[in-house]
Every structure is written in C-alpha cells, then in structure tokens.
Amino acid sequence: MINKESPIPIYYQLQEHLKTKIENGELKSGDPIPSEREMAEKYEISRMTVRQAVNNLVNEGLLTRSKGRGTFVADKKIEQPLMKLTGFSEDMKRRGIEPGSKLISFDVIKASKKVSKHLNINEGDSVYQISRLRLGDGDPMAYEVSYLPEKRITKIPEDNIRGSLYSFIEECLGLKIERAIQTLEPSFATALESDMLTIEKGSPVLLLERTTFLHDDVPIEYVKSIYRGDRYKFIAEMRR
Amino acid sequence: MINKESPIPIYYQLQEHLKTKIENGELKSGDPIPSEREMAEKYEISRMTVRQAVNNLVNEGLLTRSKGRGTFVADKKIEQPLMKLTGFSEDMKRRGIEPGSKLISFDVIKASKKVSKHLNINEGDSVYQISRLRLGDGDPMAYEVSYLPEKRITKIPEDNIRGSLYSFIEECLGLKIERAIQTLEPSFATALESDMLTIEKGSPVLLLERTTFLHDDVPIEYVKSIYRGDRYKFIAEMRR
DNA sequence: AATGTATAGTTGTCTATACCAATTTTCTAA
DNA sequence: TTAGAAAATTGGTATAGACAACTATACATT
C-alpha cells in the first residue's frame, strides 16, 4: 500500500490512496477516515507525514477536520461537468454554430519570458506560435494566439491547424491531455484585436488565457484568446 | 513581533504578519520573503512552524515557492473558481478574504419579462428583489441583484440576507440546490454600477448571470452580478 | 433529572533534527 | 578570462515526541 523505497513521496502515496477510496465510493460523504495516529501506526510512518497527506485533501475540499472528533469525507464536490475540456470548435458545435478557423500566421519563434513561464521551458526556447481567427458561422468570434513548445512536439503540418488543435495533439501526436487551467477577465479591444474581430477599438472583450497540461503537469499549450464581448458568452453549468 | 506566550498560535501570528506586509506594500509582487531558516532563527521558532505559516499563504495564493531559489510574493489578482456552485461568501472565505455584504434594497416587485422567463413564472408574478453590494475585506467587489419567486419561498427575513443566500435557502428553507447555469460576458460599468463599485464609469466589468435550480429543474433564484474587472479574475480548472 | 468529573481518543500546535533536491553563488584550475 | 567544480543556500520530505484544546462517553454527585 505504502512503499517507503519508492521515489514517490510517502505523503503523496497516502494522499492518492485516500483519494482513490473516496472516488471509488469506499468512503462516502460524512464517513470518518482512520485517525492520524491509527494511520501512522498502520503504515509505519510518522503522524506528521499522515497530516501532510490529509492536509492536502482538506485543502482540496475532499476532507474536513473536526478537532476532537476526527476527519471526515466532505460533501460531494460541486463541480463542473458540462464545460469540459473542449476547445473553441467543440464549444461552437455544442451551440449549433458552425465553427471555422482562419490561419493568420504560423511561425517558430523564441519563447518570451511570459510564454516560457507558462510552458515551463527556458526563455528563448523554440515554440510554435500560431495565430488564428476563430469563426462562428463565418463571423469572427475570437482572436487566438497559441504557443506550443517545439521540443515536446515533433512537427505540426499547417493543414492540421485548420481544425481542432486538441484533436491534433491527441490523435496525431498520441499525447493525452490531462487538464487545463484558464483565467478570464474583461478588457478592451486593442487596435489589432478590434481590426481582427471587426469591432470598434475599445469594445469590451474577454481575455482568456489557458494553459493545457499532459500527464505529470507537463504544459503542452499556452493560449491567449480575445473573445468579442458582443457575440460570445461563456456558459458554465454547475451541478452538485 | 511574535509573542510566544499569546494564546494565538505562533504560525498564525507570523502568517498575519507576512500578510500585512504584503497588503501594506512593504512586500510587492515578485519580492522574495526571508528564507524559512532565516525567519526561524530571527523569531526563535522552529522551521516547521515557519513552514506552516508560509504554507497557508501559499495555499491562499499570496506566495509562491521555488525550490532552491526562495519564496516570493505572488501576483496579486484575485482568482475566482468559475465552476464551483458556491456563492460569493464561500468563495471569499476560501481565499482568506473576509466577505461582506451591504444591503442596498429589499423589495417585493412584479416580475419583468426577463426575470419571469429565467424563473419560469408568469410575467407580473411577485418576486423578491434583493440588491446587495458584495465586499471583500471591506472593499466593494461586486454589485448583485437577486430575484427569487415569492410563491416558492415562504418568507425572507432581511437579517438573513446579510450572509450567504445559498446557506439560507438550504438551511432555513430546507431546499436543496441541485444545479446552476451561468453566463459570463464583458461589459462596461454603467453610472450606477461604477458608483456602487467605486470605479470609473465605463471601466471593464464582468457581467455574470446565473439561474439556480432545485430538483426537477425548478428555478429558485436568478442573479445578475457586476464584478469589477480590475480586482477579479475568474479562474476555471478543467480536468478530464 | 440535572450537573459535574474523569477519561480516552481526537485534531492542533510546536520543537529539534536530519537528509534530499534544486538552484545560486563562489572558488578553482585551465 | 572562462568553464567547470565545489560550496552554500533554499525549499521538500520525513521522523519522533510533547503538550494543548476539544469531543464524546460513562459514571458519579447533587
């Protein structure tokens, strides 16, 4: 169960072990987990190490502690189901709008500081820079610039860029996308952006930045998108 | 600076001490904080205790660690998980920010066409209209107008509106929130909104509209919120 | 019946120490 | 002068033990 010789930290092993039990349903909402001392004794590790594992799950919201009583499985996480890991194409299709894409530029450039940070590579490393205009039923909906680390991707034929980048990454490169994190904030359209999107300069737009990861948190893509505010709404459905 | 005799935990004293320095601007984004060993020696406490303080601030997103380099003050923007079915209060607490709420108005009005559509009731039916200013550590963060169908809710005491509406619905009314759907779009602050949020008129803001449902898709709440764009960043993590 | 008390078990806080891994800095030899 | 080696520094993981704060329970006292 716990392998002390493994290079994987003990606390992490325990953490994932507990997580699995919760996700499998062996431990349900409200169930107590074994006490810290109990687990420490059982796996022959120190209590502080157990605490480190439990702490992380508490921070993730999977467990709740109660002084003097014990630690319990938290209420089911209230999370995203619908807004899955889809890109623009899938998103549009779901709305019944025909997605389109117009390639603006395709280059290999040196990574800027910002890009290198998001992709976890060195500043100056080669990256693909792909600028595209995303269309919905033929109209410009978003201006998107993607960066992909060259060293993690052998080659990108320009043809493939017309469709979904995700499909390309998964199907052609055989890489499995694991997770993505994105931020959203309101902004104004710059001259370039307003020109691309055929809107007035200074119009309200949504600035979306997303980093996509493979297994082991290896970044594979960093995207900065400008969505026009008058035509595109972000929809999220949340379910208990 | 650190009082070992105080009933307030040492790690908490240090944590708040660092937090204050960051919020005061003594420590700016990107600045390194003293190393763990350094602080341990300076305050004559153990390194593990220092780590406990630092850990909490890292979890809050105020600090970032870098092995071999040090611990640094993080970029400051507040990030809000997009996909969780939590209200404003819960969100703020999770960030370690004290949520506040200022009741602007509380009325029973006739539902407009738009409101009635969202709540699946007839136009002109009675609805509660609750306008609130949501505060984070005392500062205005969002201006929010909620609509709840009167016929599905027996009564709302004004006192309860100060805190979480969700808690009120679930705990006091015994109704279980099942799902919610929300849209996000960029906009400009109107005169009223900019006044409420103490920002310039025309500043970029995020318009969030959410409808919350009980079981069987019975709408129980329709909310229109204006989040200030300079202090908020919506964040969504997506996982396969 | 209500209240107090003792106890065992739980998490919370804290110390002191040790070694590992990543990075930066300093020194050294070519 | 410079490239590489070595040392110093930093956060990461882990141990063992101690006492405090809190909860639930059982039992005794009033």
Image (spheres, coloured by chain):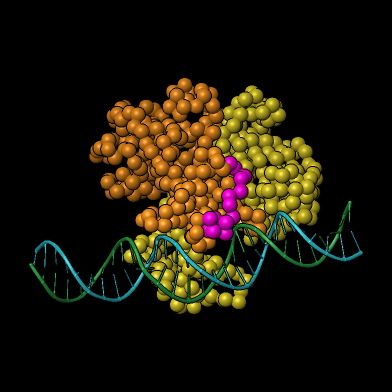
Chain colours: A yellow, B orange, C cyan, D green
Residue B33 lies in the magenta-colored region: yes
Left of A169 or right of it: where is B194? left
Q: Nearer the viewer, residue A110 or A233?
A: A110
Magenta segment boundaries in residue numbering: B28-42
Left of B49 or right of it: where is B104? left
- Residue B129 % position (x, y): 33, 31
Q: Residue at the location (78% across, 42% down)? A: A106
Q: Residue at the location (73% across, 39% down)? A: A131
- Residue B95 % position (x, y): 47, 47
From where the camera sits, is residue B205 visible? yes
Q: Nearer the viewer, residue B124 or B220?
A: B220
The answer to whether B179 is drawn above or below residue A229 in the figure is below
Q: Residue at the location (27% across, 46% down)? A: B172
Left of A15 or right of it: where is C24? right
Residue A162 lies in the magenta-colored region: no
From where the camera sits, is residue A135 visible? no
The answer to whether B228 is drawn above or below residue B175 in the figure is above
Indicate the quadrant where residue A138 lies: top right
- Residue A147 % position (x, y): 72, 46
Q: Residue at the location (47% across, 52% down)? A: B14
